[in-house]
């Protein structure tokens, strides 16, 4: 009997694929890359035309030996790594490491891990696409050169342990530019005027806002101006209904998710970081154990910037919509692929099997897995549904050179909003007068004035940062999450209530790269490099030529920074924590394992203390701060700052609320749903938390 070997990246993916293939197939996991550039050196031979030097990754020798053993026994070897540049490169490295001849290479890709797709794609095995591989090699070499050339300069001139990166540095620049906009912002005062009109003998009032003065847009900059306008309105000879107009407006259904939009929406709706979103989506793609069915891949491939949907899935979705809501809810308009740099090899992110509705899997999936799957499901179904329709209303009142306007809209047909409600639902009914018609005379009941000030631009969140990177053409779907995570890990950025703040260290590093390395600190240049990498992938550009041109411009900047840059002093953040050995105020530092407190008297005083995250709630026993801690095995727990004097410790997070029944502290319990629970004996009180309440 024939013996076929299929190599994928992960054990969970191997388990799912094995279920669909017969006993003739052995499915094993490479656990990611087998070969890579060495960590201890650049690994790119610049003198010999940028030839990379790959080695077997440390710790993977035994795994490689086992793969070679299995490959020798096999009649055919199928390389089934992910369907993107990185996956193609992993397959190429496997082929080289296993000593496969070109005629023996069988490359297969799965946009979704379902029985139909797996069996179909195995029959369509192809050779390795070296254009894809070379695009990955070019990206890897660019990132390695930038990181390994600039980072040592940062260690010498700024601080040890720092790093710079081709995409990372541009992301930091965008954050710093936003910080500058906020700091430079000068607020301006403005006022709004709202009035209520009535009509003699008629019930009701018409609520309006000042829209125009003497035919121009109304702009009120001070209270004195507002008072003058109010007096002008009250002195007007008459106020007349100038126009009553109704209309129709449609709101088109949203596109299905791309990697970027999934990360943005999961951040906004579920409070997930981009890294968490990608981790859970990877699990859903590779396969989840479903009772009675074994491992099932629940979503299509998660790294994509395409909004295309396969025709058969469009048909399946429309059949489901027809059965659930009726024919009128089906989208009959052809959806246009959005513009920009789209790699259309993949579909958008969608469910793989529409018979597996989220409600059927709520008890099977983890809480977060269920929430993300439901988000993907709802968005996909909504994308195939008809537009929502609103009836719009417009009523204007005129008199004394002033025009007052009332606008509103009422949802008349829900369309896609039956399954996916936008956060900014636009329905707003007009408060009006019974029987009102054009030409009617109305009188002012009251006018209210309200002071406002213009607001600075909002700080980026992780979700809006993903959008900024995409809008600027910086990075690719696979790089958004790790780029943001690196900025946080390096201490360049801190997160507070979802907003990203640039630290002093981040500002110093940005100023340094801005001054000496404008080639990587330039948004336009980085976006252009992404376009050229796409051309390498398409076979339209030679990958080493890209490296030659980049290095020719980059190396002089490296030499200039080495010779001219002066040492930059970065002050550590001083805290209120007192060193118990010498009495100094300790400073906050970033180390290999995160933040920690250190005595500024080093090397005379070498005292350090662990840094703990503090939650909002106080200790239920003594009122002290409550720290988030971890056991040696990584499990989270909550403990009092006064330990061991105070022995409070809990696996469950204390809340700021007390039990309405007995007055004891409530604790947050996490399961299929999140609840606040009273731990007191003979109480039993609990309440369900909304999705985002209480999350950090």
Image: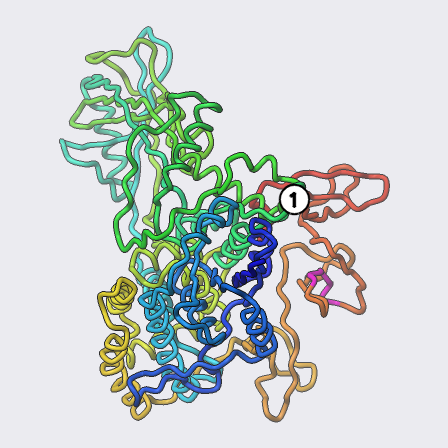
Q: Residues within 10 Å of mark 1 (few under 14, many from 20)?
A: some
Front residue of this view, candidates 322 and 393: 322
Residue at position x 69%, y 81% from top? 580
16 up-or-down from 209: above or below: below
Residue at position x 32%, y 65% from top? 177
Q: Where, quadrant-wise, is the N terminus in this rendering?
A: bottom right
Residue 55 pos. (x, y %): 48, 82
Q: Examine the image and state in which quarter residue 445 appears.
A: top left
Total number of numbered labels? 1
Front residue of this view, candidates 361 and 216: 361
Can the viewer see residue 564 in this picture?
yes
Is 389 part of what is drawn in magenta?
no
Residue 237 pos. (x, y %): 18, 18
Q: Where, quadrant-wise, is the C terminus in this rendering?
A: bottom right
Front residue of this view, candidates 96 and 24: 24
Is 691 situated left or right of 171 in this image?
Answer: right
Q: Which residues are magenta?
A: 635-642
Q: Examine the image and state in which quarter residue 3 appears.
A: bottom right
Residue at position x 56%, y 64% from top? 29
Most extreme residue toward the left is 215
């Amino acid at each position: 009997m024939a013996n076929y070997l299929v190599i994928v990246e992960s054990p969970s993916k191997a388990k799912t694929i094995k279920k669909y293939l017969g006993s003739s197939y052995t499915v094993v996991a490479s656990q990611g890359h087998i070969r890579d550039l060495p960590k201890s050196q650049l690994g790119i031979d610049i003198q010999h035309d940028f030839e990379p030097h790959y080695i077997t990754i440390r710790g993977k020798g035994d795994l490689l030996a086992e793969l070679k053993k299995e490959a020798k026994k096999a009649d055919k070897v199928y390389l089934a790594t992910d369907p993107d540049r990185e996956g193609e490169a992993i397959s190429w490295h496997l082929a080289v490491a296993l000593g496969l001849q070109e005629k023996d290479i069988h490359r297969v890709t799965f946009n979704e891990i379902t029985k139909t797709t797996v069996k179909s794609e195995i029959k369509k095995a192809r050779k390795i696409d070296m254009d894809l591989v070379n695009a990955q090699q070019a990206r890897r070499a660019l990132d390695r050169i930038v990181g390994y050339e600039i980072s040592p300069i940062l260690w010498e001139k700024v601080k040890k342990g720092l790093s710079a990166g081709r995409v990372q540095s541009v992301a930091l620049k965008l954050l710093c530019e936003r910080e500058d906009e906020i700091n430079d912002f000068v607020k301006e005062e403005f006022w709004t005027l709202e009035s209520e009109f009535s009509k003699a003998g008629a019930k009701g009032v018409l609520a309006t806002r000042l829209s125009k003065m003497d035919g121009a847009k109304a702009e009120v900059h001070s209270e004195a101006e507002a008072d003058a306008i109010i007096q002008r309105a009250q002195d007007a000879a008459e106020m007349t209904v100038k126009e009553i107009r109704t209309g129709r407006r449609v709101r088109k259904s949203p596109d299905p998710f791309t990697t970027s939009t999934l990360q943005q929406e999961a951040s906004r709706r579920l409070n997930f970081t981009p890294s968490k979103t990608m981790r859970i989506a990877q699990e859903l793609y590779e396969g989840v154990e479903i009772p009675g069915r074994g491992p099932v891949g629940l979503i299509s491939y998660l790294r994509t910037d395409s909004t295309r949907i396969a025709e058969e899935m469009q048909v399946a979705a429309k059949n489901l919509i027809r059965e659930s809501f009726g024919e009128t809810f089906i989208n009959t308009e052809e959806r246009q692929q959005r513009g920009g740099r789209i790699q259309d090899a993949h579909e958008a992110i969608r469910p793989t099997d529409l018979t597996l509705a989220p409600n059927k899997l709520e008890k099977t999936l983890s809480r977060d897995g269920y929430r993300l799957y439901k988000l993907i499901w709802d968005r996909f179904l909504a994308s195939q549904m008809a537009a929502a329709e609103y009836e719009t209303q417009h009523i204007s009142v005129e008199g004394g050179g002033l025009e007052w306007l009332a606008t509103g809209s009422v949802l008349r047909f829900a369309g896609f909003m039956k399954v996916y409600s936008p956060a900014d639902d636009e329905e707003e009914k007009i408060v009006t007068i019974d029987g009102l018609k054009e030409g009617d005379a109305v009188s002012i009941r009251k006018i209210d004035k309200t002071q406002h000030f213009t607001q600075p631009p909002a700080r980026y969140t992780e979700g809006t940062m993903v959008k900024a990177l995409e809008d600027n053409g910086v990075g690719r779907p696979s790089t958004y999450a790790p780029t943001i995570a690196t900025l946080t890990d390096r201490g360049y950025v801190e997160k507070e209530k979802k907003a990203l703040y640039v630290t002093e260290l981040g500002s110093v590093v940005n100023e340094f790269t801005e001054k000496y390395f404008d080639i990587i600190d330039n948004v336009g240049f980085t976006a252009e490099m992404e376009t050229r990498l796409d051309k390498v992938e398409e076979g339209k550009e030679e990958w080493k030529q890209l490296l030659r041109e980049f290095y020719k411009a980059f190396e002089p900047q490296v030499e200039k920074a080495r010779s001219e840059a002066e040492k930059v002093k970065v002050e550590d953040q001083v805290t209120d924590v007192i060193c118990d050995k010498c009495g100094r105020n300790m400073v906050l530092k970033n180390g290999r394992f995160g933040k920690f407190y250190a005595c500024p008297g080093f090397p005379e005083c070498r005292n350090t203390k662990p840094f703990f995250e503090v939650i909002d709630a106080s200790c239920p026993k003594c009122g002290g701060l409550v720290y988030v801690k971890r056991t040696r095995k990584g499990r989270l727990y909550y403990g009092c700052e006064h330990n061991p004097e105070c022995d409070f410790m809990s696996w469950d997070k204390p809340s700021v609320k007390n039990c309405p029944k007995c007055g004891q502290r409530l604790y947050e319990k996490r399961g299929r749903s999140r609840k606040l629970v009273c731990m007191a004996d003979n109480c039993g009180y609990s309440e369900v938390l909304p999705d985002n309440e209480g999350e950090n």
